[in-house]
Amino acid sequence: MLEKRLNADNTWLASSDAPTIADIACFPYVALAPEGGLDLTGYPSIVRWISRIEELPGYIPLPR
């Protein structure tokens, strides 16, 4: 569902213009998915979304 939502028209989950609380709430679960054995390479829109969030001002990296 996320891959389908995050396309050329929707760069964020609930808005096409800017991140919202939906992006912030979902981000940790999705970004840490590889640690649970889920390979995200087959989901290029999700990988780009993760990068966009990590480039936001004030972003603090997840502890790993």
Image (cartoon, helix red, strand yellow):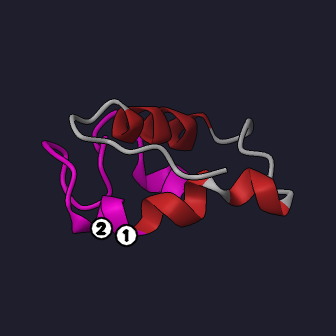
User: What separation in Å lies between label 1 and label 2 (alpha carbons)?
Assistant: 5 Å
Question: Which quadrant holds residue 57?
Answer: top left
Q: Position of residue 41 (x, y in %)?
A: 73, 35
Using the image, determine if residue 33 lies above or below residue 53.
below
For the stretch drawn in magenta, the main secondary structure is: loop
> On the rendered structure, is 59 left or right of 48?
left
Instruction: Note whether residue 21 is visible.
Output: yes
Quarter occupied by the N terminus: bottom right
Which secondary structure lies at badge 2?
A: helix
Q: Is residue 4 magenta?
A: yes
Task: Indicate which disc residue 22 carries.
Answer: 2
- The answer to whether residue 43 is above or below residue 33 is above
Q: Dot 1: what SS?
A: helix
Please say if the residues under marks 1 and 2 sit with CB atoms less than 8 Å apart. yes
Part of the protein shown in magenta:
1-25
Identify the residue position indicated by label 1 in the image: 25
Residue at x 58%, y 58% (from the top left corner): 30
Q: Nearer the viewer, mark 1 or mark 2?
A: 1
> From this viewpoint, which residue is outermost toward the left?
17
Q: Amino acid at mark 1?
A: Ala
User: Which residue occupies the foreground of this view, 26 or 46?
Assistant: 26
